[in-house]
Image (cartoon, rainbow, N blue to C red):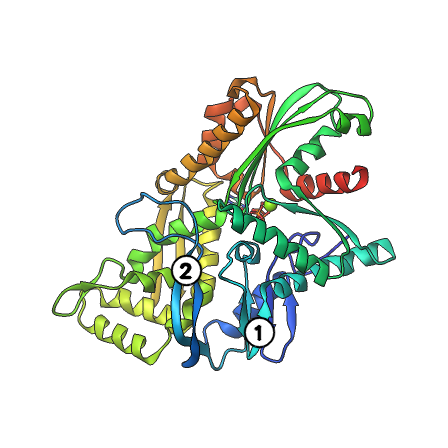
């Protein structure tokens, strides 16, 4: 049943939300299209308003990266105390929310103001869930009130954040009208989907690498003849996961390949200073890029431009900020990353007035850039093997799913560890969602 007519795959709904100034809520692919149409390439005006209080502002989804070094700490969140001041975009036609699932685990991000109205994170998520519910209601011909929600093994490495994320998701589900709500690990769901189709006794690993999380599950099947007994005779040996996947990989490409094109290595002024890190953090965290659009920052960038040998790069950065182009740039980077799963080299191209970005990226260099993340994925796999008490060569099959598992460097790591002949790829949407449906039916 179609759920998003604007999406390439109409049976899946990207979790994107656009709220316009007059309160219109647009969900799914159309949210991104509307944002690009209305918000991008338009001069942004911001004003600093005094809040009169001390708040914790969400700054970015990941830790800073020190320039030059690829050593990364864990992918946890970073917050910054913001005292009594906030930047408000005064002429924005609307706001786009992406990666709300990631925001669920950020306890500091309780919600946000959208044109004077305070929205809780649960409300934002509920708006998306309502579309899912109404589609289900229509398909069933009645109000669907029972739902099994898939969840990553770890929303966050911090237990309190992990629990908070599930609680918030449950509240959002209630707001959307669901009453009987349960949760199930997504990689286990993918295992279940496979389990009910096979009458062979075997040991399976599912690795699901999506946008926000890396998840793994090891399961053993009894090889019974009926679907119900296949389920009752299967055993979950272990699960593991980390909140590092496709989005974090995109950010890493931006850091390595895009930052230098925007002047991260430029020196300016008589003291030959470098531009501060927070400016570049906002390029990665494009949803907050508009906040840099203050007279003070822009004037300072103009001065830096005039006094730097890399003035054209700093101008590109300033234009990116002033024209609110962070999101289309992020999309271009993601598209280039996806192309590298099929070809061995590509170009990241971004052309706008005063921005002329053409960066070649070879697959080999890309693999190198994300090496430390692949290492962390491997550690999570080892944790799952240990918890299950098994050796890598005792698995019969390793099923990969999720967009990020298509990256050649990821497949290479999995192939080296488990044997290329044991790797098989499955479509994410069908395996996780179908597994959850089976769980809902038999549980
Ligand atoms: N061909 C490809 N090569 C590399 N990466 C890809 C490819 N296709 C999609 N991706 C990446 O996969 C991710 C999306 O995967 P998927 O749809 O499985 O995630 P999701 O289920 O929405 O996220 P999550 O499971 O973390 O909640 C994105 O980061 C996207 O850029
Ligand atoms: Mg997924």
Q: What element carries label 1?
A: strand
Q: Is residue 44 visible?
A: no
Left or right for 97, reference 287: right
Decide: is 367 above or below 2.
above
Left or right for 434, reference 164: right
Q: Can residue 362 be seen in this view?
A: yes
Instruction: Give the Cα distance between marks 2 and 1.
Output: 20 Å
Q: Can you give x and y, in whole percent of width and height, for residue 60 in the image?
A: 42, 59
Q: Residue 79 carries which label?
A: 2
Left or right for 275, reference 352: left
Decide: is 71 above or below 358.
above
Report whether the residue tagged 2 is closer than 8 Å to ligand 1. no
Crowding near the residue tagged with mark 1, few <14, some 14–19, many ≥20 C-alpha atoms within 10 Å? few
Q: Can you give x and y, in whole percent of width and height, for residue 175 in the image?
A: 71, 63
Is 427 in front, or is 232? 232
Crowding near the residue tagged with mark 2, few <14, some 14–19, many ≥20 C-alpha atoms within 10 Å? some
Q: Which residue is drawn at 43% across and 54% down?
A: 77
Decide: is 291 above or below 255.
below
Q: Residue at x 27, y 67 (%)?
A: 314
Which badge, 2 or 1, comes first in the chain's sequence?
Answer: 2
Residue 438 in which image quadrant: top right
Number of numbered discs on residues: 2
């Amino acid at each position: 049943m179609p759920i998003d007519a604007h999406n390439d795959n109409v049976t899946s709904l990207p979790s994107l939300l656009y709220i316009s100034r007059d309160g219109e809520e647009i969900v799914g692919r159309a949210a991104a299209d509307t944002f690009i149409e209305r918000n991008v390439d338009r001069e942004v005006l911001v004003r600093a308003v005094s809040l009169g209080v001390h708040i914790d502002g969400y700054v970015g989804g990941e830790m800073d990266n020190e320039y030059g070094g690829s050593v990364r700490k864990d992918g946890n969140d970073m917050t910054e105390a913001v005292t009594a001041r906030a930047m408000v975009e005064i002429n924005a036609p609307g706001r786009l929310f992406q990666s709300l699932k990631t925001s669920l685990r950020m306890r500091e991000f309780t919600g946000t103001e959208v044109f004077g109205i305070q929205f809780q994170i649960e409300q934002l998520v509920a708006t998306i869930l309502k579309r899912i519910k109404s589609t289900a209601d229509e398909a069933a011909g009645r109000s669907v009130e029972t739902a099994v929600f898939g969840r990553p093994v770890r929303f966050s490495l911090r237990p309190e954040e992990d629990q908070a994320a599930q609680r918030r998701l449950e509240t959002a589900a209630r707001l959307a009208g669901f009453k009987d709500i349960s949760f199930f690990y997504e990689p286990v769901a993918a295992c279940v989907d496979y389990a009910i189709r096979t009458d062979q006794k075997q040991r399976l690993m599912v690795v699901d690498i999506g946008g926000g999380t890396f998840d793994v599950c090891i399961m053993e099947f009894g090889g019974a003849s009926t679907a119900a007994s296949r389920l009752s005779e299967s055993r979950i040996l272990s699960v593991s996961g980390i909140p590092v996947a496709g989005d974090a990989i995109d950010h890493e490409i931006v850091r390595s390949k895009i930052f230098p094109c925007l002047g991260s290595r430029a020196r300016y002024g008589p003291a030959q200073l470098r531009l501060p890190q927070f400016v570049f953090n906002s390029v990665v965290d494009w949803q907050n890029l508009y906040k840099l659009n203050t007279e003070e920052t822009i004037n300072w960038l103009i001065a830096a431009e005039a006094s730097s040998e890399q003035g054209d790069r700093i101008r590109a950065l300033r234009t990116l900020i002033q024209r609110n182009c962070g999101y289309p740039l992020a999309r271009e980077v993601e598209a280039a990353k996806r192309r590298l799963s099929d070809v061995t080299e590509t170009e990241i191209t971004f052309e706008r007035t005063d921005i002329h970005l053409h960066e070649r990226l070879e697959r080999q260099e890309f693999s190198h850039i994300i090496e430390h993340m692949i290492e962390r994925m491997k550690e999570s796999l080892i944790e799952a093997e240990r918890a299950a008490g098994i050796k890598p060569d005792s698995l019969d099959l390793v099923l990969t799913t999720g967009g990020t598992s298509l990256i050649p460097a990821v497949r290479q790591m999995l192939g080296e560890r488990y044997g290329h002949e044991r790797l098989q790829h499955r479509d994410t949407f069908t395996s996780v969602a179908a597994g959850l449906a089976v769980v809902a039916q038999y549980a």
